Amino acid sequence: MTLPYAAVTMNTQQRYQEFSAREARGHSTTYAELTEGVATDRDLLALIDLLPQPKRQPNLLLAAVRFLGGPVNGYPAFRTWAIDHWPQVRATILERRTQTNEPGRCACLLPVLAGLPQPLALIEVGASAGLCLYPDRYRYVYNGRTRIGSDTSPVTLTCDAQGDVPLPEAPPEVVWRGGIDLNPLDVRDREDVRWLESLVWPEQDRRLRMLQGAVEVAAAEPPLLVRGDLNEAVRELLAQAPAGATPVVFHSAVLAYLSSTEREAFTETMRGEHAHWISNEAAGVLPSVQQRLARPVPQDRLTFVLAMDEKPVALTGPHGQWLEWLNGP
Ligand SMILES: C[S@@+](CC[C@H](N)C(=O)[O-])C[C@H]1O[C@@H](n2cnc3c(N)ncnc32)[C@H](O)[C@@H]1O
């Protein structure tokens, strides 16, 4: 995933080069090739540079071209199509956001959620379409052998778990769920779902199937999603959580979209609330979590830090594909 604030110090060419080499390579040959192509294409770079800074993200351009039906098989066809259709590509980029909703992240949240007093009232900030609000409805397979959750779920999340992960026998009990997003996506809206599908990288068929299954789960009982800024809306939503349930505010891949001042404001808000706070963000995004890490996060792969009430508990794969427990059960 592209980290918007982390990336603003790079120019567009560096950003596409970095995305190709560090994010796409090994995960999507198609995206690695396309972004490498963009990084050396003066014409396309000039068009991208006319976009507002936060809209120059590689993921956004690539998803917009796919959403509009453009070709992604080979750089020459991609760049010709993108330049020929730039007004539509630009309009889609300006209208939409990188709102990748990754239910796979629930596999990393599960041990922490299940360890809290049950039942839970879940509040996700930066929820996108709210697909991470259903950790109780998915099936989990850890290390190919430990199975948790219902066999009948249309979603199976697989995760490579290292260390003393306190894997539960059953998913958590969720009695209430609500989310906040600047732009909530609606799982019942065909165009919103197509956008979510366009955000899944080519070749990642398993992630696409998980997404489609999670959309099915959420559409059967759509979540309460509030439109707004997390700093402004979180207290009010928390106040709606029913008594008798443990309130939990959580987020993944969200705080990188905030300025450091906004992140500090959110940290202060959460410290003042009687709710557990689970963060799953790229290393370095939350300074108070980063400072409590006993050892530096390895730089050889993109890594998130899972923390409970600012205490780091695990390193995680950005899409929930792996989990490395830090502090024992
Ligand atoms: C990359 S998506 C992650 C979605 C979801 N948390 C997940 O893990 O699948 C980030 C989401 O955060 C939302 N977002 C970013 N800044 C926000 C803010 N200040 N307040 C509320 N939502 C925000 C975006 O609109 C987007 O839907």
Image (cartoon, helix red, strand yellow):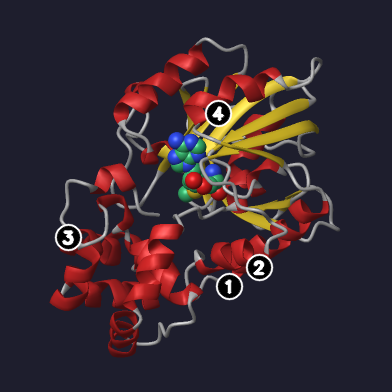
Classify mark 3: residues with Cα within 10 Å, few (<14), some (14-19) or many (20+). Answer: some
Measure the alpha-carbon separation of dots 2 and 4: 26 Å
Mark toward the start of the polypeptide (1 vs 4): 1
Tag 2 near tag 3, CB within 8 Å? no
- Name the quadrant containing residue 212: bottom right
Q: Is 176 placed above or below 87 here?
A: above
Please name the amino acid that badge 4 sits on.
Ile
Badge nearest the viewer, 2 or 3: 3
Q: Position of residue 119 (x, y in %)?
A: 80, 25
Q: Is residue 77 left or right of residue 7?
A: right
Circles 1 and 4, Cβ within 8 Å, touching? The answer is no
Q: Which residue is mark 1?
A: 205
Indicate left or right for 229 with 85 as reference: right
Answer yes or no: do the residues labelled 2 and 1 have beta carbons within 8 Å? yes
Is residue 239 visible in this depiction of the protein?
A: yes
Badge 2 or badge 3: first in the primary sequence: 3
Find residue 238 and report its horizontal and vertical position in percent: 65, 21
The mark lying in front, picked from 4 and 3, is 3
The tag on residue 209 is 2
Whole-angstrom CA distance, mark 3 to mark 1, is 28 Å
Distance from the alpha carbon under mark 2 to that under mark 1? 6 Å
User: Gap between marks 2 and 3, in whole Å?
Assistant: 32 Å
Residue 278, disc:
4
Percent across and percent down for residue 25 are 33, 68
Q: In front of the other: label 3 or label 1?
A: 3
Q: What kind of element bears circle 3?
A: helix
Dot 3 or dot 1: first in sequence order is: 3
Vertical side of 188 occupied by 304: above or below:
above
Residue type at mark 2 is Arg
Q: Amino acid at mark 1?
A: Asp
